[in-house]
Amino acid sequence: MIDGKLQFARTPYCVAFQAEWFRFVLTTVHIFYGSTSAADKKKREKEIDTLTSLLSKRAKKEDASYILLGDFNIPNVGDDTMKSLEKYGFSVPSAIKEHPTDLGATKHYDQIAFNLKLDDKMSVFSENEQKAGSFNFAKTVFKKEDLELYKKYFVDKIEGKSEQEIEKYYMTSWRTYQMSDHLPLWVELKIDFSNQYLEKIIAQI
């Protein structure tokens, strides 16, 4: 039960894939945000807790790893919402935790978490190689210096406003409607475990 209901605020979606040796179920979520109140924060924690508990139980019964990703509305990596995400066997690589995903680069709303069913020597992600992060599109498109270029597209929204107010609207509202108010995360995964498999077979001979 979440907030007295048998449903998440937004329904998670699961889809199964296999890429070479790696079988996984990708689950996307958008966790409830609401407000900054203690009650809404608890609801976020409960949603994440319920979801990770459910998927961890499914992962134990299935021959597949689980990757959980999306907007968890986690403010920082030390928050209780992050603890709920990693409570039941899911883990978030440090290379993902290092990257805020809001345009202000202060919040860690989005995460990619793994619950892997692999042999010890089979690793889909290497912390040493750090092949993960966030892509800051704001450094390439809709930049601060591009304001004059795009101003004509929202002239009706800025009548009577000061230059400072116009810049604020462009930076905090308009460009997020064109792209997003979140930065996309990415991670590069290994999917070929043939060498590890052969080593395991040889060790058994």
Image: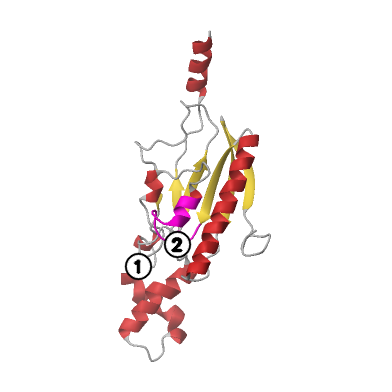
| Residue at image location 64% in from the left, 41% down from the top | 58
Query: Which residue extends farthest right?
Result: 6
Q: Nearer the viewer, mark 1 or mark 2?
A: 2
Q: Is residue 35 above or below residue 199?
A: below
Q: Is residue 52 above or below residue 1?
A: above
Q: Is residue 187 visible?
A: yes
User: For residue 143, which numbered disc appears in the image?
Assistant: 1
Q: Which residues are magenta?
A: 72-84
Residue 147: % across, % down: 35, 75
Label 2 element class: loop
Asked whether residue 74 is drawn in magenta, I would say yes
| Residue at image location 51% in from the left, 17% down from the top | 200
User: For residue 182, which numbered disc appears in the image?
Assistant: 2
Q: Is residue 128 above or below residue 27?
A: above
Q: CA distance from mark 1 to mark 2?
A: 15 Å
Q: Earlier in the sequence, mark 1 or mark 2?
A: 1
Residue 26: % across, % down: 58, 45
